[in-house]
Image (cartoon, rainbow, N blue to C red):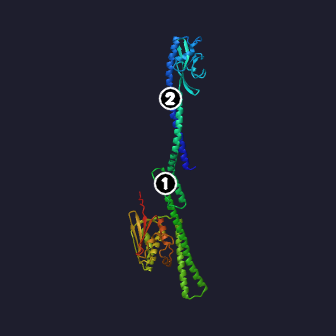
Amino acid sequence: MKLFHKIFLCVLIMFGIAFQIVGYLLINFAYENAIEQQKKIAFQDFQYNRYILQSILYSEPAFFSEEKTEVADISSRFTVPVAVYGTDGNYIFSNTAAQPGELDLLEADDGRLSFQIYGKDGGSYIFVCDYVSQSENRVYFITQTDISEVLDVQKNMIAYFQKIYLTILCVSFPAIFLLTNFVTSPIKKVGKAARRIAGGEYAERILVKGKDEISELVSDFNQMAGQIEGKIAELSDAVRKKEDFAANFAHELKTPLTSVIGYADMLYQRDLPRETVKNAAEYILNEGMRLESLSLKLMDLFVMDKQGFLLERMSVRELFQNLQQGMEPICRKREVEFNIDIEEGNIDADYDLFKTMILNLADNALKADCKILWIKGRQGKNDYRIEVHDNGKGIPQEDLGRITEAFYMVDKSRSRKQHGAGLGMALVAKIVEIHKAKMKIESDGKTGTVVSIIFHQQEEKGDE
């Protein structure tokens, strides 16, 4: 059963039961009040007619003796139907609706009035009984008060209430239906939106109205949908990158291997001039070196994804003293002016990874045909900033966002000539992530590139 039907039936049933209970209590309250009023009237009738009986017994003590024959005429003296019984319970006189033996009022204790409601032949009556003593006469005296009108009023009230109940139920039926629909419609919208999201419409959202629990549910659903959309976008991007990685990797292997196999087969099958052999061997050597560089960097990327690294507090100047000795000969060989300016500071680093990161940044700068290479280190308030700045060809704005993707190359022909495979910046980005640092790349695509690495510095604990 759907939630709409459950709420609708529950509200309808509860409303019906509540209305019936309230109606019963009100009618019963009115009936009891009416009966109490009738009891007071019956008591007054009893008291009045009791005085009449006592006056009869006082003036005519032998009136109810066995020899008295005018007893049947006594009814005209009383204002209501009455009955008289002897102390032994024997019937003396009665003009009430109840026959002798039908009432159990005679068992009342002395000094107490007994009330009994009795119905017969479509009528209802209140009988009041008490022990009456006058001179030597002792009898039970019973009066009858007609309350048929009270019961008729009660029956009319019940019939009238049932009509009102059915009328209100018919009116409330569509009202409850609309109210239930109003309550459950946001939930239906959430269900429809969930089905559309399941069908691939990840941008689906629901308009939030109000500040009740349903609105909070809708808001939470929208937030969940946003998270799902973001995760789907991330997964799609990851899948795209993996597909690009596989395609680029296959291309990077297929092209040089095809050429290498072709040149090797040519050298093996034919006798060629020395110059041709030299050119073929040079091509095989260059492609072999590029494939070697590719395999080493791929290994580095895979190793970094699977292993943890211990970072140690190191002096930045000491790190660059060793790096400077290895970089200066390379720069001189390529006729590049190399400048380094490192301020004193300490960072948490892994020496081998840090060295790999700086060498890759410098190598990218040299491959960009720069003439001047700067490396600067500046101590900040809570961080240390390293900048690698060159005046090479730069990186176009549209390529800045993808420069750290594996196998992505701005100038593919130039990168292959220099044994590049588009993995250098991907490796740098991974090392920056391991060091919990931040990397910023700036370039206008014309006047060089600035790569900034910002290392967060934790406060050193002093000796206690």
Can you give x and y, in whole percent of width and height, for residue 228 in the image? 51, 60
Can you give x and y, in whole percent of width and height, for residue 244 in the image? 53, 70
Seen from the viewer's position, the closer of residues 241 and 18 is 18
- Mark 1 or mark 2, which is nearer the start of the sequence? 2
Can you give x and y, in whole percent of width and height, for residue 389 in the image? 41, 73
Count of numbered circles in the view? 2
The answer to whether the residue labelled 2 contacts the one labelled 1, judged by CB atoms less than 8 Å apart, is: no
Residue type, label 1: Val
Residue type, label 2: Ala
Seen from the viewer's position, the closer of residues 463 and 49 is 49
Q: Element at badge 2?
A: helix
Above or below, comparing residue 170 to residue 448 in the picture: above
Residue marked by disc 1:
218
Above or below, comparing residue 305 to residue 109 in the picture: below
Above or below, comparing residue 370 to residue 198 in the picture: below
Seen from the viewer's position, the closer of residues 257 and 92 is 92
Please identify the quarter of the rendering in which residue 440 is found.
Answer: bottom left
Q: Residues within 10 Å of mark 1 (few under 14, many from 20)?
A: many
Furthest toward the bottom, the residue is 273
Above or below, comparing residue 80 to residue 301 in the picture: above
Q: Nearer the viewer, mark 2 or mark 1?
A: 2
Can you give x and y, in whole percent of width and height, for residue 377 in the image? 40, 69
Q: Is residue 73 visible?
A: yes
Q: Element at badge 1?
A: helix
Quadrant of image for the C terminus: bottom left
Q: Residues within 10 Å of mark 2 (few under 14, many from 20)?
A: some
Question: How far is the residue under mark 2 from the one under mark 1?
Answer: 56 Å
Label for residue 34? 2
Q: Residue at x 56, y 75 (%)?
A: 253
